[in-house]
Image (spheres, rainbow, N blue to C red):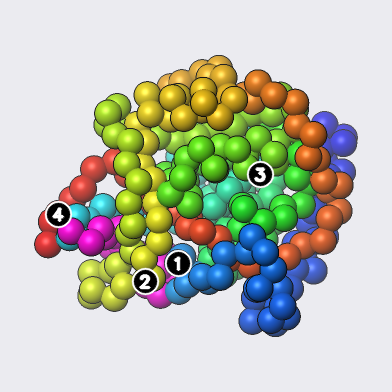
Amino acid sequence: MSGAKGMAVRVGRQAEAAVPAHRRPAAEADRPGTPADDTTWSADPYSRALRTGRGPLFLRRADGWLLLLELERWCADADEADLEVLRRCEGAVLDVGCGPGRLVAALNARGWPVLGIDVSEAAVARTVALGGQALRRSVFESVPGGGRWGTALLVDGNIGIGGDPHALLTRMAELLAPGGLLIAETVGDPDLDERVRVHVTDARGSAGTPFPWARLGTPALLRHADRAGWRAVDQWAAGGRCFVALRSRSTNSTAEPPNSAAVSSSQRAAKPSGDRPVARA
């Protein structure tokens, strides 16, 4: 654990030095591979709801389908289902799409080396306010300690980031150390394997910018994982939520030093949860 803790300390120093997005040089946003859209989860109404910790907040599809987001749970302390996930973590932990930071805070309180990344400035600010370390960062861009993390988390629906499960699983293999552990949360519907464009909306009808998203049941995730070179090591349900633990079958050859430069930027998409629609407009 000493090496993992050392990495977390260095990453924490980078987090303190990260450049705010509004001060970022214009050339950085034009860097190849950097998503140009910085308005998915960092703009209202999501950021407003995170600052207050209160919903309701929804994902909305173009056909009027709505999914209630579990904002109050995200902003509360880690529950028993969360703690079951955290008990399985190994080494230094990267929480991808950390949201308001309950998992980062829970691991930090236990002395565990952990970093959260999220595209939302409000999410990062709330995580830091809880005493955690977090960077405003896209998972598809440079991440400190790339190729060195012991565990990565994709909970609260974050397997949907970017709307392309294969691309996301490939990226997660690059970030983890060889043999590292990926824990992902799936939806309760075992037949669901969906890629859609959605936007965040609140009860007043305020809407964010549309972005691509994916929603997967456990069988669908296992199919995508197998094609992307992962093997399933466990699956379980807790608190009405479903989880899968995966390990990469390939050796990572893309490791970055843990003190690589921090880059503040956007993410293709980040953060819903839940597994069934609540209304149709």
Q: Earlier in the sequence, mark 4 or mark 3?
A: 3
- Verify CB contact (< 8 Å) between mark 3 and mark 2: no
Distance of label 1 from label 4 (alpha carbons): 22 Å
- Residue 251 location, x and y as percent? 75, 26
Distance of label 1 from label 2 (alpha carbons): 6 Å
The residue pinned by badge 1 equals 40
Q: Earlier in the sequence, mark 1 or mark 4?
A: 1
Residue in view at x 69 percent, y 28 percent: 180
Question: Quick one: SS at disc 1?
Answer: loop
The residue pinned by badge 2 equals 208
Distance of label 3 from label 1 (alpha carbons): 21 Å
Question: Quick one: SS at disc 4?
Answer: strand
Q: Is residue 198 left or right of residue 118?
A: left
Q: Which residues are magenta?
A: 44-63
Image position of 156 with respect to 34: above or below: above
Find residue 1 and report its image quarter: top right
Residue 279: give its label.
4
- Verify CB contact (< 8 Å) between mark 1 and mark 2: yes
